Image (tube, rainbow, N blue to C red):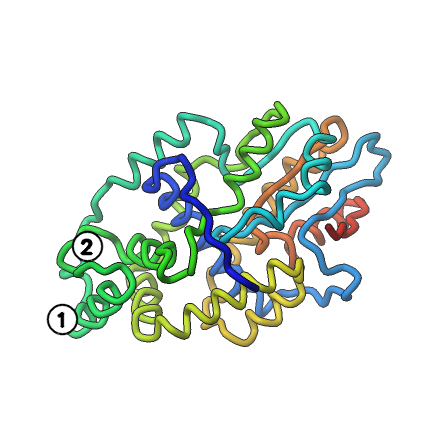
Amino acid sequence: MKLLPMKPHTMNLKTIATLTKFTVIAFLLFVNSSIATAQDLTQEEDALLWKVSGKEITKSSYLFGTIHLYCTKDEVDNPTINKTIQETDLVAMELNLNDIKVLMTMFKMAMEKPERPLNEVLTAEQLEIVDQTCRQILKDSIENLLNKSPQNLMTTIMMSPSFVGCYALPIDFFIADLSKKYKIKSMGLETIGFQDSLLKSVPDSVQNKWLMDLCQNPDKAQVELKEMLSIYAKQNGKGIYDYALKVSPEMNFFQNELLDQRNIKWVEYLSPQFQQTSFFVAVGAGHLGGDKGLINLLRQQGYTVTPIRY
């Protein structure tokens, strides 16, 4: 896939970085935990957009798998997605990105300093490795970045145009913009406080490992990210699973809390709501597949969930 430049979103980049911390990490966790749970979808069922019907509902709802680092909205800004959103009553996202209170909280969190600076978390040898990567990608010294947590620094590196090849943004912001454009109400399935608590539950040792894995071989990480973006551009959900099997480390033990239980709670809320309201549910693509993914859980509830290619 040719990575096209995208101008920075008008929203403050610190706010974008905060959302990315909450969502990119979850997406990476999906990639790792899907190894054990990925359903074997047939090629005909490979899609990012899914129609939810059946159970005598009068108006269909839709699921859409977003990606949280993407170079161009052009592939998503198409007639099918636009028409589908216009047909619904409510856009549901992980966080309501049209709520100013949510955005203000995200900005505030982006400014918070960690309990311990990086030079108290990493060894001198690790700091040297991280410093080399920061100089290479961010054109900055680790000395100026010590007040970032390992997660925040990893997010900063992964969002850097020199790393991704463009000004990457979450597709979630584009979906939020479409809901405003068509005057469709939006809501958040979770609060930012809840997502923050989930990420804070990840042990420091694991956060450090993620950062070191990235900094010890940033070129490999770039290749893997670009391949993942290419797979997403092809709407190839099965391909994302297959690639995850190839490149991801072992993090299966995070799956229940960060994926499965969240999916279950969302379906518990959405299933009865579908009877009276047409939803456009836009969440990270990692929440769609798997035995306890949204597609399978809704099918277990008796809904017909069918793929739509655009």
Residue 191 vertical position relative to residue 115 in the rendered view, above or below: above
x, y percent for residue 228: 54, 64
Is residue 115 shown to the viewer in this render?
A: yes
* Residue 38: quadrant of the picture: bottom right
Which kind of residue does numbered mark 1 sit on?
Ala
The vertical placement of 64 against 35, above or below, is above
Tell me what residue is drawn at x 26 percent, y 67 percent: 136
State the residue in front, 41 or 257: 41
Q: Give the quadrant of residue 175.
A: top right
Left/right placement of residue 235 relative to residue 133 reads right
Q: Earlier in the sequence, mark 1 or mark 2?
A: 1
Residue at left offset 53%, top offset 46%? 171
Q: Residue furthest right?
A: 56
Q: x%, y% of residue 256?
A: 52, 56
Q: Label 1 belongs to which residue?
A: 124
Residue 92 image offset from top left, x and y in percent: 59, 35
Q: Are marks 1 and 2 in contact (CB under 8 Å)?
A: no
- Quadrant of the snapshot with the N terminus: bottom right
- Residue at the location (21% across, 45% down)? 113
Q: CA distance from mark 1 to mark 2?
A: 15 Å
> Label 2 amino acid?
Leu
Q: Is disc 1 placed on a helix, strand or loop? A: helix
Check disc 2 and report its element: helix, strand or loop. loop
Q: In front: 3, or 245? A: 3
Q: Residue at x 22, y 70 (%)?
A: 132
Residue 75 at x, y percent in the picture: 62, 50
In the image: residue 53, left or right of residue 234? right
Residue occupied by mark 2: 145
